[in-house]
Amino acid sequence: MLQKIKQDIIKYGKLAGERNLSPGVSGNISVRYGENIVITASGSANGFLEESDISVIDFNGNLVEGTKQASKEKLMHIEFYKKRNDINAICHFHSPYMSAYAITSKAIDENVLPDIIYHFNKIPIAQYSVPGSEKLAQDTAFYFDKYKAVLMANHGYVTGGKDLKEAFLNAETCETYAKTLILSKILGGAKMLNEQQVEEINSMNPKQ
Ligand SMILES: [Zn+2]
């Protein structure tokens, strides 16, 4: 089981690297593992992970297994899992288009694409705090009650999913959507859906 989780983290980390979601040694990935969390180590490159780059921590952030210290964003991962029983995997990335929104402190809340409204509603932005701090974890966690993707001001973004594949696909979808929105501005800006059209989409969502 643990071995399979580590292999999955290596697989999706490599994909994140190939798709430029996780440049250099930025970002981190984790998977819930019973009472513990399997998480990439501090300073590891998601695109080139080895098993030794993956650690196991408990919900207090203590190292349970592994030789390297867990990612310094571990507190944010812990808070996300604490808030959401339906979330079992988390991706935190510094990809270019989502980071463009993050550094300009802009939430992604335009009603443009039905599938984005359906799956994400909107992507709020949490206020800036020092990376790895308890305050950043708390400020970002504030949005985890309602949202599965959250921008982090002057930093990057985080997504959750029921498993690692879903968390990764959510991250990839966010990045592609951010790129689409930015491209649309070159063409004069996206045409918004109206209130009724948004309601129609939300009424299809069983979670509403
Ligand atoms: Zn980060």
Image: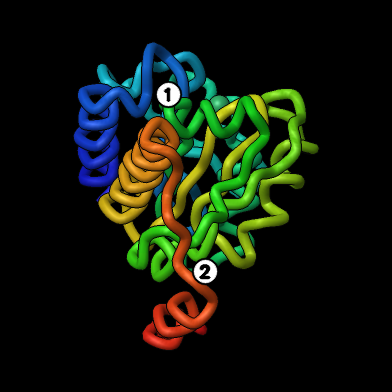
Residue 165 locus on image (x, y percent) = 26, 51
Note whether 55 is above or below 109 in the view shown: above
Note whether 42 is above or below 162 in the view shown: above
| Badge 2 amino acid | Asn
| Badge 1 amino acid | Pro
Residue marked by disc 1: 96
Circle on res. 161? none
In this image, 3 relative to 35: left or right?
left
Of 46 and 16, which appears nearest the observer?
16
Q: Residue furthest right?
A: 135
* Residue 33 seen from this side: no
Of 142 and 121, which appears nearest the observer?
121
Label 2 residue SS: loop
Decide if ligand 1 comes within 8 Å of the CB at mark 2: no
Q: N-terminal of the two: label 1 or label 2?
A: 2
Kindly indicate the quadrant of the structure image that contains residue 191.
bottom left
In this image, 97 relative to 84: left or right?
left
- What residue lies at 69% left-to-right and 43% top-to-bottom? 126
Residue 69 locus on image (x, y percent) = 53, 22
- What residue lies at 42% left-to-right and 49% top-to-bottom? 190
Residue marked by disc 2: 85
Label 1: how many residues lie within 10 Å, few (<14), some (14-19) or many (20+)? some
Label 1 residue SS: helix
